[in-house]
Image (spheres, grey):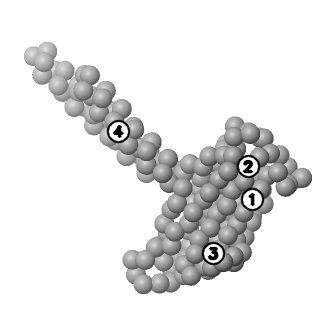
Amino acid sequence: MKKIVQLTLAAAAVVAAQAASALDFQTAAGSSFTEYFTLTPTTTNTLAFSVSGLAVQYDSLSFELLGAVPTINATLKNGNLVGAFNDTRNASYVLNGGTPYTLKVTGTTKAAIPGVFGIVAINTLNGSVTPVPEPESYAMLLAGLGLVGTIARRRMKKTEA
């Protein structure tokens, strides 16, 4: 039983590590995409972040903090499409520290050589950003936990017999 708990904790650590490193994401060439992230300011009205990608890889790139900030389209700057937000410069709303907000990033990649991906970077100051897991991730986690539980039950029955 102790081994099963250790395996479950190890699997959870792997899932958490994957989520924490996803500040950059890739998109297939010649396609449109929409990705969601959770963005949490550390303190009220101090959040600054940017979303950027190479102009040679993207036709368009934009972001929106759902329910808080209207859509901001990235503009060309030094060969990059960059969209930036600075909370200290806004006067029409307040982003509260410790409150999670949903960041929606959309765009269209340029058609390129098959197998080439465009990379979008999200950089934050005075906040943290984490990806919103896809439903398939939760399904795989639950299936894995169910499998571990089934194995544990069979082993318990074998030791009782």
Q: Residue beneath label 3, please? A: 80
- Residue, far front: 78
**Mark 2 vs 1: CB contact within 8 A:** yes
- Residue, far top: 160
Q: Is residue 64 left or right of residue 156?
A: right
Q: Looking at the image, tell me whether mark 2 or mark 1 is earlier in sequence order.
A: 2
Which element type, helix, strand or loop, lies under badge 2?
A: loop
Mark 3 neighbour density, 10 Å: few (under 14) some (14–19) many (20 or more): some
Q: How far apart are marks 3 and 1 (CA)?
A: 16 Å
Q: Looking at the image, tell me whether mark 3 or mark 1 is earlier in sequence order.
A: 3
Q: Residue at x 72, y 70 (%)?
A: 73
Q: Residue beneath label 4, please? A: 11
Which mark identifies residue 85?
A: 1
Which element type, helix, strand or loop, lies under badge 3?
A: strand
Q: Looking at the image, tell me whether mark 3 or mark 2 is earlier in sequence order.
A: 2
Quarter occupied by residue 150: top left
Q: Looking at the image, tell me whether mark 1 or mark 4 is earlier in sequence order.
A: 4
Which element type, helix, strand or loop, lies under badge 4?
A: helix
Q: In this view, does 20 lie to the left or right of 78?
A: left
Q: Distance between the residues labelled 3 and 4?
A: 37 Å
Mark 4 neighbour density, 10 Å: few (under 14) some (14–19) many (20 or more): some
Q: Residue beneath label 2, please? A: 47
**Mark 1 vs 4: CB contact within 8 A:** no
Q: What residue type is labelled 2?
A: Leu
Q: What residue type is labelled 4?
A: Ala
Q: In the image, residue 126 lies at what x, y percent?
A: 69, 46
Specify the quadrant that holds the N terminus.
top left
Mark 1 neighbour density, 10 Å: few (under 14) some (14–19) many (20 or more): some
